[in-house]
Amino acid sequence: MKNELKEKREQILDQAAYELSDELLEVNDKLEKAYSIITEMSNYFESYDVKDKEDVSAIICEFPKNKKFANIAYDYVYEAKTIIDELYGRATEAQKSKKNIA
């Protein structure tokens, strides 16, 4: 009996993943882009020593570029979170309506 329930749950999860594949791809794309930007930015922070005067100059020179990268990464994460929040809201409403039916 437990195996049947587990299999049924797996089938439901597979169907849900299939139904949401476009949304999942969109969220994944945004997060991959943000991850790439953040990885590049972490190299910026790890490359310099704030106690070295030459490094401080480089940090200052590269700051505007990295500020833009941070803003772009933020936008991607915000957009991905917005999609997830919308899907979560829909799932919550669907669960409420399902409880009212049962």
Image: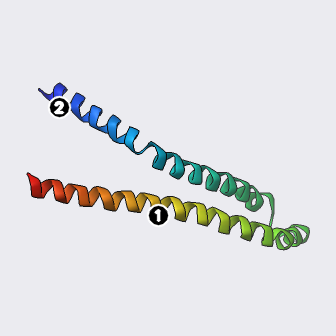
Viewer-proximal residue among 76 and 58: 76
Secondary element at tag 1? helix
Residue 26, horizontal then vertical, whole percent: 53, 50
Q: Which residue lies furthest to the right in this view?
A: 54
Residue 91, horizontal then vertical, whole percent: 29, 55
Residue at 67% over, 51% down: 36
- Badge 1: residue crowd in 10 Å (few <14, some 14–19, many ≥20): few
Identify residue for label 1. Answer: 82
Tell me if I can see residue 68 in this picture.
Answer: yes
Residue 13, horizontal then vertical, whole percent: 31, 38
Is the N terminus in the top left, top right, bottom left or bottom right quadrant? top left
Mark nearer the viewer, 1 or 2: 1
- Marks 1/2 in contact by CB < 8 Å: the verdict is no
Identify residue for label 2. Answer: 5
Query: In the figure, is residue 20 to the left or right of 42?
Result: left
- Label 1 is placed on what type of residue? Thr
